[in-house]
Structure formats: structure tokens, C-alpha cells
Image (cartoon, rainbow, N blue to C red):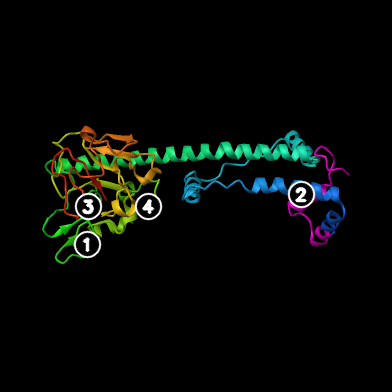
Amino acid sequence: MTSSPDSEFDPKLLDLHLGRLSGPERAALEQRIKNDPALASQNEALAAMFAALNSVPEPELPQGLTERISARVAAAGPPPRVVRPARKTTAQLAELEDAPLIRMRSFREIAAVAAMVVLAVGLGVPSMLHMRERGQRIACSQNLANIGRGMQAYALANNSSLPFAGWNGNINSWRPTDEPGLRVLPNRRHAYALSRYGYVPVRFFVCPSTGGLPMPEDQVRKHNDFLESRNVSYAYQNMAGMRPSLRDNPDLPVFGDDNPLFDNGWPLFGSLGLSDPANANSRAHGGAGQNILTIRGNVRWTTTPNAGINNDNIWTLDGVDKYTGREGPQSSTDSHLLK
């Protein structure tokens, strides 16, 4: 036996690497490999090929895929009626079952198959991930479109005012604080009114690109805020300053993917070294960009945070460098999307 890639090789080698041998068979073959240099060379080549295949990472399945598939199967109803095949078809299937399996006999054949597998994975996984991210981005925009319709319905019922839970700059802070006399009022609590009063189901507040979890529907009427931060993925216009209404510029962004410069109201400028907020996109879509919703109800995708009126940065307040938690927009065109 020779070690040439095109020569015949012992099929037991392939069974060894596929784990098909019993304990005694494996021990006997390993002894043969030790005593036969040509067989050992072939075994090393097979081991290298299997190592290359095993090095290809498995694609990460989308979160909740099993549950969604189960739900689709359940929604499809009872299984279809089984139709027995004709005798001719049954005979053809029997012939296929009796046909011998094709076995690869040379290293070149195995290498070709391995190369095709690696190529298929290399091309297919990035494409699948791109399609998944595109689907999540579209689902996110649909969430914001539903929030926009609920927001406008709320405004029409409240004299054109956008959702607002009240604010007193002397005692309230949207930034977490232990300062005596101050009560934390997260900015997301204003947006919660849309679910609290039945305008927007809470499931639309979770972007599919994040690890968020919708708040239980049966808890919505019992609370004045989302139970936890992951119940809401979107940032709402800072309501601590000049509050917008339907009468303001319809192109003003008032909702969008979460602000990357704040963590639940806490500024991250110093801790993360974010010295240039003009280049910081939301983390929700891997930093590629963010979906934003305007007063008009339009949803659009932007790859820069300078997407407000007159290229206003939607993550920061005009003229503010230090955030204590009581700052808000001082003009009707200043967007500051904050969770």
C-alpha cells in the first residue's frame, strides 16, 4: 500500500475517524497503524482533513427558532392525509434501498468533498447571517411603525401631546442617582403610557435584534413602568425639556433603536471612551445603523446618528457636555432619544 493521495486505502481508517469501530477493532487498527508507515501516513492525512472540517464554526441559530417552528407547526393544523404510493413507485424505492452505498476510496475524493463542505459553509453562513439581520431590521421597523400609529392615536386623544408621564425638574431625574430628595423617573416611563392605556401592545417595544423580553401582557395595567430594562429596546424623545407635539416639525425623530451613549440613563462617555458621538450607532443592529421614527409616523433606516433636523445628533442634547439627569431639549428641533 502506498501513501499517494490517489491510491486505495483501508476503509477501516474512515470508520475509525467516524467512530464506527468497536473497542477491539479500534485497538487492532491502531496497532496496525503503528506497524505500517504507509497506513500511518494515510491516517495522518485523514486526521488533518477531519480537523479542517471540525474547525468550521457552527452557525448560531436565531434566538427562539425552536419555539417559532413549533408555533408554525401547531398553526398549520392536523397533518395531511397519507396517500400510499403505487406498486411501481414502491418497487423503485425498494431498488434504491437495496443499492449499495457509494464509498469514497481515495484521499482525493475525500479532499474534494471536504473542500465542497468548507466552501458551502463559508459562502452559506455569511449569507444566512446577512439575511437574518436584514429580517430583524425589517421587523424592527415594523415595530416602530406600530408604535408610531399608537403614538398618533394617543396624541389625537390628548390635544396633540405626545406620551408624557409628568415631570418636575426639582425632584425628578432620568439618570440613576442617590442624591437626597431626587426621585428617578426613567425616560422610558413616558413611552410606557402607550401600552398602559392600550395604544400599543408591549411586544412591539422589543427589537428582535436584541436579547429583549416583552413584558407580560397581564402585568401592563398593574404598573406605571416596564418591569425591567429588557422589556423595551427603543429610546424615546427626552421629555425633561421642551416636549414635542403633533403640531411640531413632522420630521423630528421621537423614537428609535436604543441610545449607545447611555445605559438606562447613565452616561457612558467617560467609561467607554466615546469621544465622538457623531460616529456612534445603536448597538441593536451591530453598530450598522438604527431605525428611527418621526412625528409624522415615518420609519427610516440611517447609518449615522446625525439624522435629526438639520443633521442634529439624535443621541445628545445641543450644548450639553455633562448630564446630571435633569437636562432636556431646549428647542423644538433638538432630538435626544433616551431610554
**Mark 1 vs mark 4: which is more N-terminal?**
1
Question: With 289 as the anchor, is 185 left or right in this view?
Answer: left
Q: What is the secondary structure assignment of the residue under circle 3?
A: loop
Task: Using the numbered discs, state the Cα–Cα distance from disc 4 to disc 3 in whole angstroms.
Answer: 18 Å
Residue labelled with disc 4: 212
Q: What stretch is highlighted in magenta?
A: 1-27
Tell which of 257 and 152 is nearer to you.
257
Residue 187, disc: 3
Residue 43 lies, in percent from the top left, at: 78, 49
Query: Are the residues at dot 4 and dot 3 in contact (C-beta closer than 8 Å)?
Result: no
Residue 44, disc: 2
What type is the residue that disc 1 sits on? Thr
Q: What is the secondary structure assignment of the residue under circle 2?
A: helix
Residue labelled with disc 1: 177
Residue 226, magenta (yes or no) = no
Residue 239 lies, in percent from the top left, at: 17, 48
Task: Using the numbered discs, state the Cα–Cα distance from disc 1 to disc 4 in whole angstroms.
Answer: 24 Å
Which of discs 2 and 3 lies nearer the camera? The answer is 2
Which of discs 3 and 1 lies nearer the camera? The answer is 1
Question: With 165 as the anchor, is 99 left or right in this view?
Answer: right
Query: Are the residues at dot 1 and dot 4 in contact (C-beta closer than 8 Å)?
Result: no
Task: Using the numbered discs, state the Cα–Cα distance from disc 3 to disc 1 in whole angstroms.
Answer: 14 Å
Task: Using the numbered discs, state the Cα–Cα distance from disc 1 to disc 2 in whole angstroms.
Answer: 63 Å
Residue that sits furthest to the bottom in the current view? 180
Q: What is the secondary structure assignment of the residue under circle 4?
A: loop
What type is the residue that disc 4 sits on? Gly
What type is the residue that disc 2 sits on? Glu
When the figure is inspected, residue 212 is found, relative to residue 99, above or below; the finding is below
When the figure is inspected, residue 296 is found, relative to residue 327, above or below; the finding is above
Question: What residue appears at the point 34 percent right and 36 percent down from the top-left corner?
Answer: 303
The N terminus lies in quadrant: top right
Which of discs 2 and 4 lies nearer the camera? The answer is 2
